[in-house]
C-alpha cells in the first residue's frame, strides 16, 4: 500500500504537480540565460546554448506531454490540453533559441512552409519543433526562414486564447497561468522577429514561475492530505447548469478512483458495514466486507437477488489464499496460479480455512453450504481496496436479471439511491462479467464451465490441459 500513498504517486493522481513544476524549471532556464546575456552582453552559443535547448525540450516539453497524458487519463481534459500546449511552447523555445547557431552543410529547402501548416496541425507542433531541435546539428537553418516559427507562435496565441476561456471556468490559478502564458507567447513572437525587450521576458517568466510554483505546491498538498488546504481560487465564470443538475446532488458518496482519498473513503465505508459500488477488472460490482454479514445480506435486498444465488469473494493475491492453508491439491494450486489474477473465478470446496482467510462472520453468507467462488482481480484499484478492507463479498452491480453496469454512471443511476458509495473509475475494462470455472472435482474429472464470460472457454480449457500435462 505504500506505493499508493508515497510522494511519487502524487504525479499519477495529480498530474498538475508534474506539469507545473516543469513549467517552473523551464521558465528558470530561460531567465538564467537572459540574465547571463544581460550581464555579459554576449548571447550564449555552442555547447552552453545546446544544453539549454535540450533541457527545455526534455523538462519543459516531454514532462509536459507526460503530465498532459496523465491528465487525460483522469478525465481532466482542460488540464491535459493546457499541458500539451505548454509542451509545444517549451519545445519550440528550445528548438529556436539556437536555430542559427549550429550550421552543418545540409540545406533545408522551403523552410518557410513549415509555419503555414502549424495552425492546422497543432497536435504535431511539439513534435515538429522537437525534431528540428534534436536534428539541428544536421540542418542548416538560416535567419531567412524565421517566418515559419513566427507563424507558429501566432498559432500558439490563438490556441492559448481558447485555453484562457476554458481556464476561466476552472480556477483562478489556471486562469492567471494562461494569461501570463499569452504574454510569454507574445515574447516568443517578438523573439522570432528579433525585437524582444529582454526585461519583459524576464519579468513575465518570473511571474509565470511564481504562479506555477504556487499551483504545484497547492496541488501537492491538497492531493497528499485529501482536502483543499491551499486554495486554487474560484472560477471566474460558471458553466450554466440545468435545473436538474442544481437540484439533484449525487445520491451517494462518489469519490474518484485515482485519488488515494477516494480509495480511503470507500474503504472506510466498507469497513463500517456499508455496501458500495466498485470497479473490477471486468464490469462494476457491489461489494461488502466479509466482516459484516449484515452488509452481505443487504446486497441481496439492494439488487433483488434470489437467496439461492451465491455471492463470491475477492482477494488481492494468491499468497493470501496460501496463508490460509486450504486443503487444495497440487493440480488445483497450479491451475489457480495460471488463471489468477484475471477474469476467471474458481469454485472450490468450502472449509474452516475461509475464516483464516479473513472471511470471519460472513462465512455462512458467501458461497453455498459446500462451495465458494474465489477470484483475484487483475486491477490495481480493486487490489489496493481489498488490501485496505480484507476479503470482499462481490456480485455484479445491476438489478437482478438486468444488464451489467459498464460505467460508474450506470451504477449511480440504477442503484445509487440504495448504496452508501460508488468508487468512480470511468468505463469498465470489459463489457461482460468473469468466466466461472467449477474446480470441485478437478482431480477426478477435471473442470467444468458454469458461465462463459470475458475469458473464452477454449482458453480456459487450454490452460487446464497445459497444467494437467505439466507443460506450463
Image: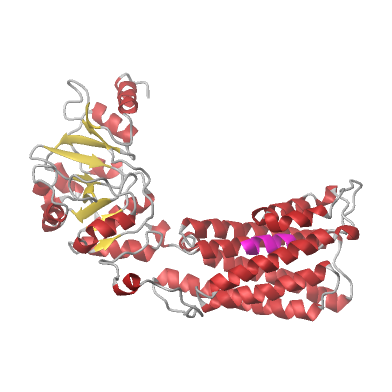
Position of residue 215 relative to residue 421, above or below, is below
Residue 447 appears in the figure: yes
Residue at the (30%, 71%) spot, across then down: 249
Of the pair 403 and 380, the residue shown nearer to us: 403
Q: Quadrant of the N terminus?
A: bottom left
Q: Is residue 143 left or right of residue 285?
A: right
Q: Quadrant of the C terminus?
A: top left
Residue at the (28%, 34%) spot, across then down: 336
Q: Is residue 58 left or right of residue 304?
A: right
Q: Position of residue 215 (x, y in %)?
A: 54, 74
Number of numbered discs: 0
Residue at the (36%, 53%) spot, across then down: 381
Per the picture, the main secondary structure of the magenta-coloured stretch is helix
Q: How is the image coloured?
A: secondary structure
The image quadrant that residue 177 belongs to is bottom right
Q: Is residue 297 left or right of residue 47?
A: left
Which region of the structure is painted magenta? 85-92
The image quadrant that residue 449 belongs to is top left
Q: Position of residue 172 (x, y in %)?
A: 53, 79
Residue 129 appears in the figure: no
Instruction: Looking at this view, name the residue that lies furthest to the front.
Output: 243
Of the pair 92 and 60, the residue shown nearer to us: 92
Of the pair 242 and 212, the residue shown nearer to us: 242
Instruction: Looking at this view, name the residue that lies furthest to the right.
Output: 105
Is-magenta flag for residue 191? no
Is-magenta flag for residue 86? yes
Amino acid at each position: 500500500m505504500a506505493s499508493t500513498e508515497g510522494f511519487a504517486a502524487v504525479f499519477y493522481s495529480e498530474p498538475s504537480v508534474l506539469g507545473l513544476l516543469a513549467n517552473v524549471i523551464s521558465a528558470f532556464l530561460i531567465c538564467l540565460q537572459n540574465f547571463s546575456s544581460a550581464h555579459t552582453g554576449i548571447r550564449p552559443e555552442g555547447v552552453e546554448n545546446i544544453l539549454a535547448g535540450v533541457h527545455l525540450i526534455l523538462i519543459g516539453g516531454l514532462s509536459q506531454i507526460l503530465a498532459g497524458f496523465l491528465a487525460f487519463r483522469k478525465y481532466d481534459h482542460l488540464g491535459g490540453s493546457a499541458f500539451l500546449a505548454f509542451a509545444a511552447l517549451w519545445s519550440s523555445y528550445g528548438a529556436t533559441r539556437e536555430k542559427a547557431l549550429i550550421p552543418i552543410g545540409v540545406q533545408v529547402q522551403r523552410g518557410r512552409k513549415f509555419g503555414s501548416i502549424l495552425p492546422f496541425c497543432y497536435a504535431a507542433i511539439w513534435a515538429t519543433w522537437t525534431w528540428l531541435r534534436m536534428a539541428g546539428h544536421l540542418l542548416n537553418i538560416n535567419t531567412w526562414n524565421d517566418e515559419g516559427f513566427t507563424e507558429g507562435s501566432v498559432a500558439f496565441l490563438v490556441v492559448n486564447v481558447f485555453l484562457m476561456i476554458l481556464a476561466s471556468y476552472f480556477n483562478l490559478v489556471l486562469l492567471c497561468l494562461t494569461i501570463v502564458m499569452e504574454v510569454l507567447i507574445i515574447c516568443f513572437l517578438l523573439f522570432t522577429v528579433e525585437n524582444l525587450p529582454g526585461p519583459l521576458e524576464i519579468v513575465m517568466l518570473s511571474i509565470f514561475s511564481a504562479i506555477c510554483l504556487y499551483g504545484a505546491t497547492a496541488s501537492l498538498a491538497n492531493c497528499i492530505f485529501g482536502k483543499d488546504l491551499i486554495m486554487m481560487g474560484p472560477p471566474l465564470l460558471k458553466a450554466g447548469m440545468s435545473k436538474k443538475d442544481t437540484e439533484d446532488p449525487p445520491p451517494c458518496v462518489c469519490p474518484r478512483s485515482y485519488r488515494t482519498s477516494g480509495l480511503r473513503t470507500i474503504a472506510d465505508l466498507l469497513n463500517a458495514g456499508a455496501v458500495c459500488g466498485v470497479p473490477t477488472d471486468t464490469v462494476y460490482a457491489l461489494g461488502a466486507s466479509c466482516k459484516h454479514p449484515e452488509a452481505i445480506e443487504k446486497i441481496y435486498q439492494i439488487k433483488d437477488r434470489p437467496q439461492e444465488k451465491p455471492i463470491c469473494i475477492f482477494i488481492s493475491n494468491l499468497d493470501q489464499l496460501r496463508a490460509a492453508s486450504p486443503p487444495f491439491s497440487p493440480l488445483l494450486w497450479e491451475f489457480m496460479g495460471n488463471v489468477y489474477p484475471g477474469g476467471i473465478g474458481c469454485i472450490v470446496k468450502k472449509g474452516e480455512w475461509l475464516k483464516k482467510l479473513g472471511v470471519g462472520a460472513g462465512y455462512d453468507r458467501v458461497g453455498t453450504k459446500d462451495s465458494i467462488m474465489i477470484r483475484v482481480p487483475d486491477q490495481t484499484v480493486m487490489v489496493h481496496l481489498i488490501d485496505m478492507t480484507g476479503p470482499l463479498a462481490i456480485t455484479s452491480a445491476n438489478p437482478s436479471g438486468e444488464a451489467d453496469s459498464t460505467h460508474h454512471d450506470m451504477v449511480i443511476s440504477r442503484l445509487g439511491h440504495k448504496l452508501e458509495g460508488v468508487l468512480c473509475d470511468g468505463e469498465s475494462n470489459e463489457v461482460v462479467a468473469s468466466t466461472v470455472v467449477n474446480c470441485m472435482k478437478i482431480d477426478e474429472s477435471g473442470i467444468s464451465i458454469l458461465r462463459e464470460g470475458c475469458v473464452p472457454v477454449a482458453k480456459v480449457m487450454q490452460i487446464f490441459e497445459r497444467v494437467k500435462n505439466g507443460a506450463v
